[in-house]
Image: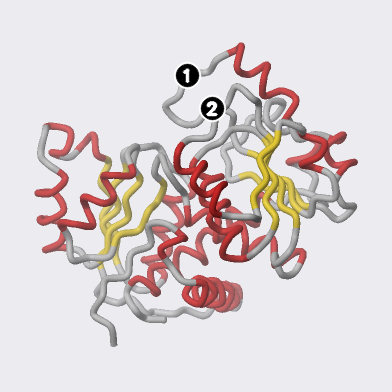
Amino acid sequence: MSFKKRNFINLSELNKKDIIAILDRAKELKKKRNANKSAKTLKNINLAMIFEKPSTRTRVSFELAIKELGGESVILDESTTHLARGETIEDTARVLDRYCQIFLIRTTNHNKLLLYNQNAKAPIINGLSNLSHPCQILSDIMSFEEKRGSIYKKKITWMGDLNNVLYSWAEASRIFKFSLFVAHPKVVKLNKSLQILDKECKHITFTQDADIAAKDSDCLITDTWFSMGSKKDKLLEKHFLPYQINKNTLKAAKKNVVFMHCLPAKRGKEVTKDIIDDKKVSIVWDEAENRLHVQKAILEWCLKKI
């Protein structure tokens, strides 16, 4: 057995075989849960969860995941710990390392994840950073494949902001070899990380033409136009409006297109109510549910149970 620590920080840091193993295990764990069967694979494991940002799905899914696998969780809101009073991440990591076998970090700064990794023996899971959100994308891929089969060579369309969720989708496009079309306002520029992926990956197309991006798409995805912590800008919102997902967007896509959103959503902004609440098109609730099963599999993979 390899003694190398298994982190789950960015999808590009895992090989495809490991990612498929996580997804396959998530599907198996979902079947077990639906059959009221338990899988107590992580008994005596303590998960430390550190949250700098608000969370619903990540927090609940990981708390239930470790509990249902037989372990325990310790939830720390940064504002109520000594991190808020100046204690260093390095010292916090060293202390928690004596108590817990695995960490989940939800942070405003991706570099903080790297500091925890450098100062703890425990594996680190990225519960969201300003750079990426890999847990969400595995849940999304699982949900898509449940409804439409393999994502290989499919056309996936992203509309709106260029954010952390998109970054992980871009990483996934290189791994799973699907086409990713990204439609965004011209005023919203690619950051350096996305620029690098754009140059390296032939599967990604950035465009300002929403119609081209949506044409014959197998999956339409969007996210809130203003990420947590960013100020709403009425002028910028006007630039985003042509990238709203609505009935006209669906007309350009394939007949069996699915709609995805990581939530929370602003109905009437990035997506209209009739799309997100249409059970024939929207699979947002499947995405949310599958977070639980994927988180379980990620925990097991990090702790070398799969």
State which quadrant residue 295 falls in: bottom left
Q: Quote the CA–CA distance across marks 2 and 1.
A: 7 Å
State which quadrant residue 10 falls in: bottom left
Residue 226 tag number = 2
State which quadrant residue 176 falls in: bottom right
**Which amino acid type is shown beneath numbered disc 2?**
Phe
Are there few (<14), some (14-19), or many (20+) residues within 10 Å of tag 2? some
The one nearer the camera, 289 or 134, is: 134
Residues at discs 2 and 1 in contact (Cβ within 8 Å) = yes
Q: Which residue is mark 1?
A: 231
**Which image quarter is the N terminus in?**
bottom left
Residue occupying image coordinates x 54% and y 27%: 226
Residue occupying image coordinates x 56% and y 45%: 166
Circle 2 sits in a helix, a strand or a loop, which is it?
A: loop
Circle 1 sits in a helix, a strand or a loop, which is it?
A: loop
Residue occupying image coordinates x 62% and y 35%: 265
x and y percentages locating residue 78 in the rendered image:
24, 39
Is tag 2's residue or tag 1's residue first in the polypeptide sequence? 2
